[in-house]
Image (cartoon, rainbow, N blue to C red):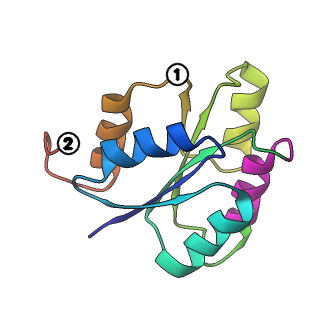
Amino acid sequence: MTQILVVDDNPLIRKLLGVALSRHFSVCEAQDVVSGLACVLRHKPQIMFLDIMMPSAKEGLELLETLRQHPEGKNILVAMVSGHTDPETRALAFAKGADAFFSKPFNLSEIAHWANEHLAVQPGVI
């Protein structure tokens, strides 16, 4: 089963994304950058949904930058999920290698559609 990783310090966000995606994907959840990186190495996800702002400022962007420099993370599709939606933050996320950006509050069906589309899942399965 295709592996997806959700990294967010907010347990409700992790739960929402996990429930929305777990019907057709295996979902790993991490609450911070350290456990997120451990999940990448252990589970080798195809997609990561990553919060920008976590306890130590812009940790999500730091993890994204680390992934793009690491052999295990270069090919992971990374969708940023953040309440910080100003143009500068969005531009910075894409400059560091994000593949998509979803604003909080997000639309679960839009996120599921994006995952389906990028993982070549049959349309309408989520």
Looking at the image, residue 95 lies above or below residue 66: above
Seen from the viewer's position, the closer of residues 119 and 35 is 35
Q: Residue at x 60, y 47 (%)?
A: 50
Looking at the picture, how far across and down is residue 26, in whole percent?
Answer: 33, 64
- Which residue shows up at 72% across the image and 48% down it? 60
Q: Residue furthest front?
A: 11
Residue 105 got which mark? 1
The local secondary structure at tag 1 comes to loop
Residue found 32% across the figure and 48% down from its top: 21
Quadrant position of residue 83? top right
Which image quarter: residue 67?
bottom right
Asked if residue 99 lies in the magenta stretch, the reply is no
Residue 54 place in picture, x, y as percent? 75, 43
| Mark 2 vs 1, N-terminal side | 1
Q: What numbered label is drawn on residue 69?
A: none
Q: Residue 17 location, x and y as percent?
A: 42, 42
For numbered disc 2, what is the local secondary structure? loop
Image quarter for residue 51? top right
Residue sitting at x 33%, y 45%: 19
Residue 83 in the figure: left or right of residue 6: right
Crowd rating for badge 1 (residues with CA inside 10 Å; few <14, some 14–19, many 20+): few
From which residue to which does the magenta span run?
56-68
Residue 114: x percent and y percent? 35, 40
Q: Nearer the viewer, residue 7 or 124?
A: 7
Q: Rounded to the nearest whole Å, what is the CA distance between mark 2 and mark 1?
A: 19 Å
Horizontally, is 12 left or right of 50 in the view?
left
**Outermost right residue:** 56
- The residue carrying pointer 2 sits among few (fewer than 14), some (14 to 19) or many (20 or more) residues within 10 Å by Cα, namely some
Report the disc number at residue 126.
2
Q: The N terminus appears in which quarter of the rendering?
A: bottom left
